[in-house]
Image: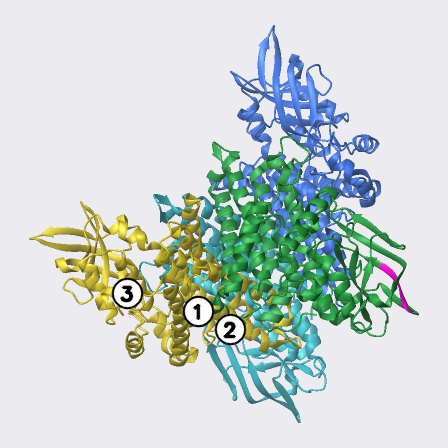
Chain colours: A blue, B cyan, C yellow, D green
């Protein structure tokens, strides 16, 4: 039987509170703005996409052990539950944290499912503060494992990877990739260090200012056996098992950012006056903000329900995680829409912070499948 | 974090579970309506009053009220009893206005005599209660009530017209706000208990719903005489007392909403089943990706409602104490409405067929449920009023009126 | 080149104005209420569905020549354009007219496409005031001609029809049916008088109070050759050609009824006071009513655009008619929803007229395919 | 019924058609923005000013203004010229604020000298105009403007801060409301023409949009001296004059909306094309029934907009004279927004890629268009304000403020 409280107890509350406190001190929104949106020309018009990254902040985060949260105790991590990881991701979303935390948590969840020595070694690195990102998506944007554009070949007793992985999240901030590559035996998963010979990272020009995305070219990258996370043929199942956790993490990030949008817009409606009334007096403002809240609460409840399903090893975890992602993506889309619109003229300007969250939401809505995609998958499960 | 049961509570929970399993009543001859406030047949009244009385005698009703007034004298037991009744999927308690609105108001504002007189038979469903707030000219704006109460020695003379009074055909008592003075909109109101059944000057007229069925009423008062002893709290305190009642209305709505057990869950399961059995094109309506997407949206909202009920008890995952509780009514009723509408859509041309038609899918349930759903989004505070309340009380925005 | 004004000129305006005037005099809403919603028990709980029908009103309508409007001049009709027929249907919807006018107009449009002596004879009857209804839908609710449950067989030099036609509109108010029946040679269309031997009309218990629906059982009904509207194999094409006109008529009815819902709800918002303001002061009331209007105007424009396409013989008429039906059905659904909700408590009662229109809209939304169905068809045309 | 052209009008229509066909300009080196108010490059300004001047000289601009002020002196010609320009799909006229808002205001409230001085170069696009109504604290609520105008002999001294001033970087003149008195919210306002280009005390600062691009501006006034001769109408009449301007804003918005020609049509065609070329699953995004249903909904709304533009000229099919015209802005801008959002959805993961990215579908148009769409639903009266106006002016409901 499942815990009534999602298993969200004291430890999880303490973690969440400490994360929230740290981020609100270390990265208040004006600091975030300076970091990622200091210069609009540099943001979008430079020849190379900018890398808005406070590496010292990231080192502090790693020192605080956030990367270790999802790593099993056996690999030197804290081995916390999915509900704790969800809370961590929710707070990252609320702060629109520009860091490799989210891809690292996602990679961790994939590595946890592999159960190999290679996966274990990678998990130990993450527990020690390394950042990682999945490199599993092809040029068309499909992350179905079999669709990968990377090929693994055996050459002289070694595995060699060739091809390009697309839509790799925070590629310029991480230490290694977990690459899906296919061979005749099926899909395998491999650890590839960012600096390994043959690796070229081509940064994408993206809308979202709080992250970094790239396509990663692998030109005959040699893999040692210790770097094999899943042998050819095992990779697809590992990723399938990790899918609910991956979706929960993205959904939690969406919920956290949407909560920021809600609170910021409600605050504006409380203080901004038009026609001799605070904006919130007008139901055309008040009711949509209430609808934002209703959507967020639905999504957040589904996120923790799905996280608890993952923790309990429920067969229905895929269904509930897809529901959580779908609801979160829809909640975020609506929150983004209304947060800009209800801020009026100022909301359309670069100086107003709502666009930073708007763009992060756009990115997360699509990541690993938007709401319509998830619902099509859910339809097949009902 | 969810509160852990104390040893006493754990014992009580076990008692509820055992008792409910052993005493689950056989279903009535005809299907119960979805909500207590929709009960309209004498057969259902009798069945449900008997059931509530049995639950009361087993200690599952009024658990947290003082024993001096017929309650159980416990703390935190009612929540457990409610959870276990929902879990056991037994029939709802019929005296929903009494339990949800009248009883807490009387407990708060009543005299010792009033509490002793009215509470025990209310709990036992020996006396059914109804509520008289809304009037033809005062729907969402309750404070503009015009029903008059004129002092006449030790009595008051009531004249006026109340509407939307669910259960009035069965009720012995009504809680009512009336105007004793026109000087001030709010301070001109006083709160009474008034007899309904067999009372000279009181006319209860069932109102017909758009479904063609009855289930709520209008009540006319013509020179109805009530003793001053039936006044609740001071003259001029009517609005304050009414606020106590409304504070508990949500509880009543939730109680009402739990219906015959899992109203939402049943509706969603029925929707998916309907789609899978309804032929469309070469296959079924479920094969239509657009319809399926809509059904899945409904299913996600229903799952959200379920997980929100769970989250509402986890302190660490709540942003504001009233944020989830105050959403319940609007979220549930709009979901039920949208689900019924999608169901109707699935039935296509067959959606034209109503309950009396033998070929109507699911006995005509879908058009009936869709029409009925508007009662839910309108009664007990329209969805529009609910959104005002949420925006104002939870998000601190300025009042819209 | 199409007329800029849809070809909606003086004649059409005169017709529309006279229809509106007649109906507002002859069938004001309180009279409508008494006629169709006088007794709620009789309406829904009787053993036989009630027939709410003012036959004398119908005779006046026939005498005014409304049935002849769509009949070609060659068959003794007025031969007016589709834009005029749309206007007539729009007014019928606005008055929620309980009469066989709409099915007769629809049957007329089908007969016009047949070009046979049988069709001509039927058109002449309609021009003379007879009412007719298509009987083409099967038990599952499909009106695709090939799906009909009625079979035509040759017996002794005569055609004999056997089977049941379902969802026949206003079956107890019309004089004859135009039946789709299939044989080895394909689908044919046949005129069957309501009183013909072998015909049994089984009235359905329906939600809509303003019309009458039945399944019509044909037990070996003999058809004379003069009653053949389309020979076996020709019927499907005739119905396909008539489809845009049929959809325009239903869409126009939806628009007219939605306009009534709009005006009635706006009036309520002007006069009903709550919290010391007229309801319309509150944007939660005002803005949805404005959205009703926007939806209606879109739908109405599409209706006249599609009607003009029919008049001009445009190949795109099917596309534009399906767009009109889809937009009208959506506009009606929203108008129904808000008209009840915004009337509050009174809107949920039988005594408030909004439910009469609500139910007529529900019926029309589904008739010949709801919005989702139409959009699926449109998708295939784009 | 649609008005038939008079013989003169028919002749003029023919002239427009022939002239436009013969004089259609070659496209500029870089793509024009969608709206005149978004023009931000000097190259586009030059190109568009030259084009407007050419149209003016051919008699297609200011046709219905008196010839004494540089107009054509006709009646009902401008509508025809606009129709023909739209039909010919030629570039838009850049001086959209001038033509749509300043010119009718000056015609109505200006002195003889003012009309003669300002109108001809406005029509010829020799002088670009901008508008200064909105301020940081006065967005939708224009009457709360705080920019001050203090009388100083024959001059006025302006101090304040205007925002949302499209075209200000190119403008020679601005129409502006300023506060000469704090006694009355409305009667304390006076309306001026003020120089912008090369004017001491005036600072024009491009505002950056959420897209990262520029296109509108804030304008600061610090002790800017303007002669009393540049006042429009009486002191204290500012609000009345502003109402004249706003009455014509819709026209400006429509003009702006017609953009590079058929903005909506292009967007819809692009959307369908995008879906048909975007791989998804085994086929394309167009094969996804749920996405296709969404696109079809957008296409229906676009077709509705087209037919409504047609119906707006058929008297017999209109219920209220302002009902369709006042809908134009909100319907068009919300459609463009929703279309862009669906486009973004179709691109899936590729929607993350922005304009500089070589792999971005359609050159990054979809995220750019979606972000830009909020300018349209906010500027020139937010969608919320538009709905107030429709509810109040067309449906007669009570004012919401």
Q: Identify the magenta region.
A: D154-160
Residue picked out by circle 2: C264
Q: Is B133 left, or right, of D181 in this rendering?
A: left
Label disc, if present, on residue C71 of the rendered structure = 3
Kindly identify the residue that appears in the image at 54 percent across and 77 percent down: B163
Question: From what the image shows, is residue C93 above or below residue A131?
Answer: below
Q: Is B207 left, or right, of A264 in this rendering?
A: left
In 3D space, how far apart are the residues under numbered discs 2 and 3 (Cα atoms)? 34 Å
Kindly identify the residue that appears in the image at 66 percent across and 72 percent down: D399
Foreground disc of the pair 1, 3: 3
Provide residue D366's location: percent of width, then percent of height.
61, 41
Question: From what the image shows, is residue A39 above or below residue D103?
Answer: above
Label disc, if present, on residue A145 of the rendered structure = none
Q: Are marks 2 and 1 in contact (CB under 8 Å)?
A: yes
| Residue A30 visible within the image | yes
Residue picked out by circle 1: C357
SS at badge 1: helix
Report which quarter residue B240 is drawn in: bottom right
For disc 3, the chain is C
In 3D space, how far apart are the residues under numbered discs 2 and 1 (Cα atoms)? 11 Å
For disc 2, the chain is C
Residues at marks 1 and 3, common chain?
A: yes
Sequence order check, earlier mark of 2 and 3: 3
**Quarter of the figure that contains the C terminus of chain D:** bottom right
In 3D space, how far apart are the residues under numbered discs 1 and 3 (Cα atoms)? 28 Å
SS at badge 2: helix
Sequence order check, earlier mark of 1 and 3: 3
Provide residue B178's location: percent of width, then percent of height.
63, 83
């Amino acid at each position: 039987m499942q815990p009534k409280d999602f298993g969200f107890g004291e430890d999880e509350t303490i973690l969440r509170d400490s994360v929230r406190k740290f981020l609100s001190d270390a990265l208040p929104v004006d600091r975030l703005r300076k970091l990622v949106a200091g210069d609009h020309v540099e943001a979008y018009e430079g020849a190379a996409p900018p890398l808005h990254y406070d590496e010292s902040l990231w080192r502090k985060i790693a020192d605080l052990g956030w990367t270790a949260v999802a790593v099993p105790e056996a690999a030197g991590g804290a081995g916390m539950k999915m509900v704790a990881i969800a809370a961590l991701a929710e707070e990252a979303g609320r702060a629109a944290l520009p860091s490799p935390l989210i891809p690292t948590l996602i990679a961790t969840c994939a590595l946890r499912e592999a159960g190999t020595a290679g996966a274990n070694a990678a998990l130990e690195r993450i527990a020690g503060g390394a950042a990682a990102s999945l490199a599993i998506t092809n040029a068309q944007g499909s992350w179905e494992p079999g669709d990968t554009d990377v090929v693994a070949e055996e050459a002289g007793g070694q595995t060699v990877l060739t091809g390009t992985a697309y839509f790799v999240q925070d590629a310029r901030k991480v230490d290694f990739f977990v690459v899906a590559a296919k061979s005749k035996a099926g899909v395998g998963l491999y650890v590839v260090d960012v600096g390994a010979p043959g690796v070229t990272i081509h940064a994408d020009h993206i809308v979202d200012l709080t992250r970094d995305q790239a396509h990663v070219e692998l030109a005959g990258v040699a893999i040692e056996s210790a770097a094999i996370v899943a042998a050819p043929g095992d990779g697809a199942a590992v990723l399938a098992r990790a899918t609910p956790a991956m979706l929960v993490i993205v959904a939690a990030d969406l919920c956290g950012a949407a909560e920021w949008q809600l609170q910021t817009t409600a605050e504006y409606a409380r203080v901004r006056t038009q026609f001799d009334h605070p904006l919130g007096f007008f139901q055309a403002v008040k009711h949509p903000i209430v609808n934002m809240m209703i959507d967020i609460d639905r999504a957040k409840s589904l996120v923790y329900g799905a996280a608890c399903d993952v923790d309990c090893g429920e067969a229905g975890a895929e269904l509930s995680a897809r529901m959580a992602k779908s609801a979160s993506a829809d909640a975020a889309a609506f929150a983004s829409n209304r947060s800009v619109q209800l801020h009026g003229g100022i909301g359309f300007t670069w100086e107003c912070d709502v666009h930073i969250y708007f763009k992060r939401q756009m990115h997360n809505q699509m990541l690993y499948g938007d709401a319509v995609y998830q619902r099509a998958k859910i339809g097949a499960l009902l | 974090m969810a509160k852990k049961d104390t040893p006493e509570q754990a014992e009580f929970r076990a008692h509820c579970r055992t008792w409910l399993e052993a005493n689950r009543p056989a279903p009535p001859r005809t299907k119960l309506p979805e909500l207590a406030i929709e009960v309209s047949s004498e057969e259902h009244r009798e069945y449900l009053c008997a059931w509530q009385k049995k639950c009361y005698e087993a200690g599952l009703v009024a658990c947290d009220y003082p024993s001096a007034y017929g309650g159980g004298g416990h703390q935190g037991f009612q929540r457990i009893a409610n959870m276990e009744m929902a879990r056991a999927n037994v029939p709802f308690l019929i005296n929903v206005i009494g339990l949800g609105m009248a009883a807490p108001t009387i407990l708060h504002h009543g005299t010792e005599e009033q509490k002793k007189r009215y509470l025990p038979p209310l709990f036992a469903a020996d006396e059914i209660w109804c509520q008289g707030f809304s009037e033809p000219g005062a729907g969402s704006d309750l404070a503009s009530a015009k029903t008059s109460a004129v002092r006449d020695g030790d009595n008051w003379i009531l004249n006026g017209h109340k509407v939307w009074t669910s259960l009035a055909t069965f009720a012995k008592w009504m809680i009512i706000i009336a105007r004793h003075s026109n000087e001030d909109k709010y301070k001109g109101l006083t709160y009474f208990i008034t007899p309904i059944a067999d009372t000279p000057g009181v006319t209860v007229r069932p109102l017909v719903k758009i479904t063609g069925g009855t289930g709520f009423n209008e009540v006319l008062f013509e020179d109805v005489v009530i003793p001053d002893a039936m006044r609740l709290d001071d003259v001029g305190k009517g609005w304050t007392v009414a606020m106590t009642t409304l504070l508990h209305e949500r509880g009543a709505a939730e109680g009402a909403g739990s219906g015959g057990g899992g109203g939402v869950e049943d509706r969603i399961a029925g929707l998916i089943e309907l789609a899978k059995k309804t032929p469309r094109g070469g296959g079924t309506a479920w094969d239509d990706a657009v319809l399926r997407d809509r059904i899945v949206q409904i299913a996600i909202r229903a799952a959200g409602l379920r997980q929100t009920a769970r989250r509402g008890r986890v302190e660490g995952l709540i942003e504001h104490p009233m944020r989830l509780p105050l959403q319940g009514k609007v979220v549930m009723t709009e979901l039920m409405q949208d689900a019924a509408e999608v169901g109707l859509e699935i039935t296509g041309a067959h959606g034209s067929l109503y309950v009396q038609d033998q070929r109507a899918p699911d006995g005509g349930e879908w058009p009936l449920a869709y029409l009925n759903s508007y009662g839910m989004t309108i009664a007990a505070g329209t969805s529009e009023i609910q959104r005002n309340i949420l925006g104002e009380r939870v998000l601190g925005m300025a009042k819209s009126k």
